[in-house]
Amino acid sequence: MRTDENNPEDWLKSASSRLASADRLFAEEGASEAAIELLQESTERFLKAYLIARGWRICKIHDLGSLLSEAEKHEPAFGAFADFADELTDQFWAIHYPGGDLDDSPPDFAALREQLAKMLVLIQA
């Protein structure tokens, strides 16, 4: 089956798959680098699905803050997730490429996951 980058349902399916994988990995390993990357990627895809459903033209971007700003144009309540978006994006870039500033303490996956759950209420509304 071929997917379509302009179909929000394809983005939702991809986002849900990555989120389920992140949850399983977290349950098994804790806040591993892979679990954080999957959490960021799922959040990115959920936001892209929301935006595409509202006519946004897809662009290759990984910055959750930028995507959130676009979503805020449609629903101001997304502004409440700015800190979450910035923190998760920072964690993603620190982990994704060598040379990032990795903190000695692991990210709080559970708190980040909780914020995503709250944001999903807006996305699914």
Image (cartoon, rainbow, N blue to C red):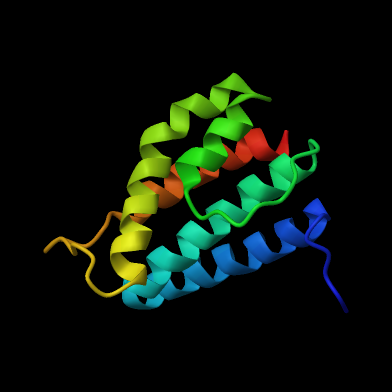
**Could you say which is closer to the camera, residue 57 or residue 13?**
57
Residue shown at the point (28%, 63%) measured from the top left: 94
Q: Is residue 66 left or right of residue 109?
A: right
- Taking 118 as reference, is 82 left or right? left
Q: From this viewpoint, which residue is outermost toward the left? A: 104
For the question of whether residue 31 can be seen, the reply is no
**Image quarter (top left, top right, bottom left or bottom right) of the C terminus:** top right
Which residue is at 82% across, 55% downward? 6
The answer to whether residue 1 is visible is yes
- Return the x and y of residue 41 as percentages of the image width and height: 53, 61
x 83%, y 64%: residue: 4
Q: Give x and y (percent) for residue 104.
A: 11, 64
Please state, as top left, top right, bottom left or bottom right, where the N terminus lies in the image: bottom right
Front one among 23 and 48: 48
The image quarter containing residue 78 is top right
Q: Please say if 64 is above or below 78.
A: below
Question: Is residue 50 left or right of 80 when viewed as pictured?
Answer: right
Q: Give the answer, above or below, for where 67 lies relative to 89.
A: above
User: Residue at image x 44%, y 51%?
Assistant: 113
